[in-house]
Image: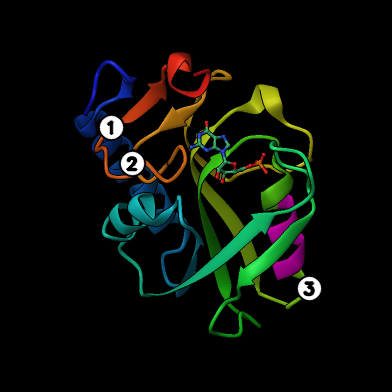
Amino acid sequence: MDLLQVEVLYNREQIQEKVADIGRQISGDYRGHELLVVGILKGAFVFMADLIREIDVPMEIDFMDVSSYGLSTSSSGEVRIEKDLEYSIKGRDVLIVEDIIDTGLTLKFIYENLKTRNPKSIRIACLLDKPSRRKAEIFPDYVGYSIPDKFVVGYGLDYAEQYRHYPAVCILKPAVYEK
Ligand code: 5GP
């Protein structure tokens, strides 16, 4: 990790403990059920890979990729499905796994979209939450950390497709994007 560019917010060990904690909660809540875990690409793939190995109930996994469109650089709430689920979720217990909720507009769209497909239940697990930035009414069921309004990278999260492989969640130093 280039510590001139980033500052560690949560290290590998802290994240591991937190993810194990969320996994235990989910295992307890879904005991006797079978899950369909839906990861939102690309950012959630690292969190999802770790989280599913901490969940001790039968499951299948699937992925969805969405992108915001519109002119604004921040989330516009107009979301397009780039890659849809492979399987039907009708009658299934769905757990959406997301890396970070910022305005909530992206997840709101995904949640409403999946709801129309008649799942038995939908819940949301996200590693990071920036509640101060919320614009849409969306309430994650499992949250790793609530964080302040800083731009973070690592553990799957990118800036211009960089930093996803960093094992820690890091704050990106403004000098990097203010150049
Ligand atoms: P929302 O629709 O909630 O505003 O946007 C959520 C998406 O914005 C996340 O899935 C993520 O891709 C991106 N995002 C929001 N905040 C951050 C951040 O601090 N760092 C990174 N790398 N992406 C973010």
Closer mark to the observer between disc 3 and disc 1:
1
- Residue 96 at what x, y percent from top left? 55, 59
Name the one closer to the observer, 48 or 164.
164
**Span highlighted in magenta in the image:** 108-114
Q: Amino acid at mark 1?
A: Ala
Kindly identify which residue carries mark 1: 168
Q: Crowdedness of circle 1 by 10 Å Cα count: few (<14), some, many (20+)? A: many
Kindly identify which residue carries mark 3: 116
- Residue 74 at what x, y percent from top left? 70, 36
- Residue 125 at what x, y percent from top left? 51, 49
Q: Residue at x 33, y 41 (%)?
A: 155
Q: Crowdedness of circle 2 by 10 Å Cα count: few (<14), some, many (20+)? A: many
Q: Residue at x 36, y 49 (%)?
A: 47
Q: Secondary structure at mark 1?
A: loop
Q: Crowdedness of circle 3 by 10 Å Cα count: few (<14), some, many (20+)? A: few
Q: Mark 2 and mark 1 in contact (Cβ < 8 Å)?
A: yes
Magenta segment includes 67: no
Specify the farthest residue to the front: 179
* Up/down of 54 relative to 80, above or below: above
Q: Residue at x 28, y 32 (%)?
A: 168
Query: How much space separates mark 3 and mark 1, taking CA atoms?
Result: 36 Å
Q: Amino acid at mark 2?
A: Tyr
- Residue 130 at what x, y percent from top left? 59, 28
* Up/down of 61 relative to 22, above or below: below
Quarter of the figure that contains the N terminus: top left
Position of 67 with respect to 163 (left or right) is right
Query: How much space separates mark 2 and mark 3, taking CA atoms?
Result: 31 Å
Kindly identify which residue carries mark 2: 155
Query: How much space separates mark 1 and mark 2, taking CA atoms?
Result: 6 Å
Q: Secondary structure at mark 3?
A: loop
